[in-house]
Image (cartoon, rainbow, N blue to C red):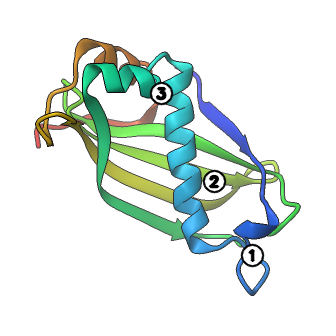
Amino acid sequence: MNDYLRPLEIRWADLDPNFHLRHSVYYDYGAYCRICFLEEHGLTNSMMQELHVGPILFREEAVFRKEIRLGDKLQIKLQLMKAKKDFSRWTIRHQLIKGENILSAIVTVDGAWINTLQRKLATPPSEVIAVFDQMPKAAEFVWHSL
């Protein structure tokens, strides 16, 4: 599959006292990108409610490389890094790219699916699997058995 890229708009409220992007905004951008991908591929919030399933995160990590400031042209790229074959566990990488091709930050999340009625980890239904199977895979993508 082709890359999944989303343009991002930097707001005044996203800045810290040094006039560059606050650290927590990087995580917000990652969540925004993931939800946009899911919704654009048919896995909407209402569908997840009907299926009684939702994504949860175990780990969220950001590596900051280049400063991002108000007015910078910014986009975020989403890639699946690893997953179980049933997509019950997964790792997604987000790359924040400034300007034409400056890698400014990498946000990596490890997650899974929870049954929202039982409040327990769950294997996702086929609708979720079909969407995750469309997610762009990184060059170093691996199937894992965690």
Residue in the foreground of this view, choosing between 138 and 122: 122
Few, some or many C-alpha atoms within 10 Å of disc 2 (few <14, some 14-19, many ≥20)? many
Q: Nearer the viewer, mark 1 or mark 2?
A: 1
Residue 140: in sight, yes or no? Answer: yes
Single out the mark in the foreground, 3 or 2: 3
Q: Is residue 115 above or below residue 10?
A: above
Q: Quadrant of residue 20?
A: bottom right
Circle 2 residue: 96
Q: Are marks 1 and 2 in contact (CB under 8 Å)?
A: no
Which residue is painted at 35% across and 36% down in the image?
141
Tell which of 140 and 41 is nearer to you. 41
How far apart, in angstroms, are the residues tagged by discs 3 and 1? 29 Å
Disc 3 residue type (three-letter): Leu
Task: Please provide percent x and percent y for residue 73.
Answer: 83, 52
Identify the secondary structure beneath mark 1. Answer: loop
Instruction: Using the image, tell me which numbered label, if any, was put on residue 20.
Output: 1
Residue depicted at x 50% and y 68%? 63
Do we see residue 78 in this rendering?
no
**Left or right side of 80 for 105:** right
**Where is residue 135 drawn, in percent x and y?**
45, 26
Location of mark 3 (residue): 38
